[in-house]
């Protein structure tokens, strides 16, 4: 069977996965800023009787909520893509080729590392694999 694996789906999965990791780091930083600055921001706003500090705090909260929603959407899409990828892999009859596909496209293991783990040459490995990816 040829052309079972759609690289576009796999690339989208990896792109979203990477984006989500960056968003999670950004969210952690924002949460730290909110926690460390919340008391200072609120007391500053009260002492000055101005809405500027409170507005800034509200902007942080809004940014945090937006990041959380974006992460949730990405997780939902990642779940869909993972199911699609697993479905593609399930159509490969050879357990050895399924193993190669998972290592290469889900775990991002290099061809040389896969060849070493499977005790074969890179050339033999690529020959077995050829034609399964579009």
Image (cartoon, helix red, strand yellow):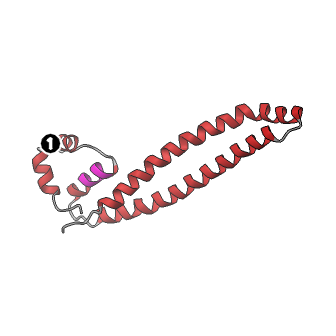
Q: At x 74% / y 41%, what residue is drawn? A: 56
Q: Main secondary structure of the magenta part?
A: helix
Q: At x 17% / y 56%, what residue is drawn? A: 129
Tally of marks: 1
Q: Secondary structure at mark 1?
A: loop
Q: At x 14% / y 50%, what residue is drawn? A: 125
Q: Residues within 10 Å of mark 1 (few under 14, many from 20)?
A: few
Q: Is residue 63 magenta?
A: no
Q: Is 95 situated left or right of 25 in this image?
A: left
Compared with 6, 105 (above or below) is above
Considering the image in quadrants, where does the C terminus appear?
bottom left
Considering the image in quadrants, where does the N terminus appear?
bottom left
Residue 76: percent from left, percent from top: 51, 60
Residue 70: percent from left, percent from top: 57, 54
Q: Nearer the viewer, residue 15 or 109?
A: 15
Compared with 93, 56 (above or below) is above
Residue 48: percent from left, percent from top: 87, 33
Q: Is 103 situated left or right of 13 in this image?
A: left
Q: Is 132 situated left or right of 17 in this image?
A: left
Magenta span of residues: 99-105
Which quadrant of the view contains residue 119? top left
Q: Is 116 situated left or right of 24 in this image?
A: left
> Label 1, on which residue?
119
Compared with 81, 124 (above or below) is above
Q: At x 73% / y 32%, what residue is drawn? A: 37
């Amino acid at each position: 069977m040829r052309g079972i694996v759609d690289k576009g789906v796999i690339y989208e999965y990896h792109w979203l996965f990477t984006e989500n990791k960056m968003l999670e780091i950004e969210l952690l930083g924002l949460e730290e800023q909110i926690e460390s600055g919340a008391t200072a921001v609120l007391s500053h706003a009260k002492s000055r009787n101005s809405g500027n500090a409170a507005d800034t705090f509200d902007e942080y909260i809004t940014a945090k909520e937006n990041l959380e929603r974006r992460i949730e959407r990405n997780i939902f899409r990642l779940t869909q893509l993972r199911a699609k990828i697993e479905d593609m892999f399930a159509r490969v009859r050879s357990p050895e080729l399924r193993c190669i596909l998972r290592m290469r496209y889900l775990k991002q293991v290099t061809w040389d590392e896969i060849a070493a783990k499977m005790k074969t040459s890179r050339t033999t490995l690529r020959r077995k694999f050829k034609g399964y990816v579009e």
